[in-house]
Image (tube, helix red, strand yellow):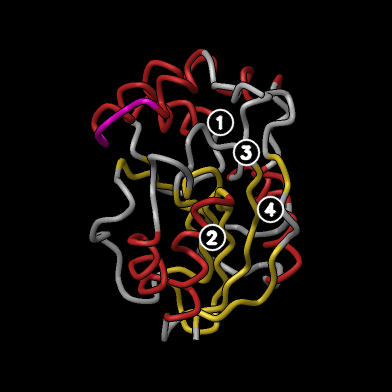
């Protein structure tokens, strides 16, 4: 059977060969992103928010939305009783959409996988959806996310299945700052896109 291929803006994003190209494609997609992902049945944000609410006490703050995109997560966290949420994303165009929605204290145009300009333990929790995937961000980003999470804090991350098997699971197991708390069964994040491979969401605790 012929392998299905992504089409449209998603195909362009996955074909990008540098962070700058990825950012440019997301900038161009920002205005239509929410509609497109809704039509595809995008599940990662709702799954990750549900897990965070299960494993983080109400009122805990601040929280970092690492890979905030158009702000699909930020508004929900406020509704659930998390008063202070910051976001970062590689695409300024996506962040402009997130800013217009409200829900974030601060938004930063930054790439994961590099040093982040936040103090050690600055965040009570980190949530990251749709970022740890093919051609985007890999296990190299975990040490910085662990560094900026307060001891005892929670990280909820969605991960493409192949990336989890190839490197992320081992990186978590080898980390002296992160322990596994829970993981979902594999699921397809976009049922409306036949090319979408299964991923999972994991809950980690900062030791």
Q: Majority secondary structure of the magenta segment?
A: loop
Q: Nearer the viewer, residue 188 or 201?
A: 188
Q: CA distance from mark 4 to mark 3?
A: 21 Å
Q: Residue at position x 52%, y 71% from top?
A: 124
Quick check: 178 above or below 195? below
Q: State left or right for residue 20 relative to residue 185.
A: left
Where is residue 59? Give x, y as percent. Answer: 66, 67
In space, the residues marked 2 and 4 are separated at their CA atoms by 23 Å
User: Left of 22 or right of it: where is 98?
Assistant: right
Q: Which residues are magenta?
A: 15-19
Q: Label 2 belongs to which residue?
A: 165
Q: Is the residue marked by circle 2 packed among few (<14), some (14-19), or many (20+) residues within 10 Å?
A: few
Q: Nearer the viewer, residue 104 or 25?
A: 25
Mark 4 closeness class: few <14, some 14–19, many ≥20 residues within 10 Å: some
First in sequence, mark 2 or 3: give its number: 2
Q: State whether residue 63 is above or below residue 122.
A: above
Residues at circles 4 and 3 in contact by the CB criterion of under 8 Å: no
Frontmost of labels 4 and 3 is 3
Q: Which residue is mark 4?
A: 49
């Amino acid at each position: 059977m012929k392998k299905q291929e992504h089409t449209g803006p998603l195909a362009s994003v996955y074909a990008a060969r540098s962070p700058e190209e990825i950012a440019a494609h997301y900038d161009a997609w920002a205005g239509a992103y929410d509609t497109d992902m809704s039509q595809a049945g995008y599940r990662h944000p709702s799954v990750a928010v549900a897990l965070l609410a299960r494993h983080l006490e109400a009122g805990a703050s601040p929280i970092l939305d690492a890979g905030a995109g158009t702000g699909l997560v930020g508004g929900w966290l406020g509704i659930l009783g998390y008063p202070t949420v910051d976001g970062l994303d590689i695409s300024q165009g996506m962040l402009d959409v997130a800013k217009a929605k409200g829900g974030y204290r601060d938004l930063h145009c930054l790439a994961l996988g590099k040093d982040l300009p936040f103090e050690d333990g600055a965040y009570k929790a980190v949530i990251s959806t749709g970022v740890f995937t093919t051609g985007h961000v890999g296990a190299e980003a975990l040490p910085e996310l662990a560094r900026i999470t307060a001891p005892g804090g929670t990280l909820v991350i969605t991960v493409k299945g192949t990336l989890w098997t190839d490197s992320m699971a081992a990186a978590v197991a080898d980390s002296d700052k992160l322990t596994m708390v829970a993981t979902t069964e594999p699921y397809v994040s976009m049922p409306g896109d036949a090319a979408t491979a299964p991923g999972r969401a994991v809950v980690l605790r900062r030791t």
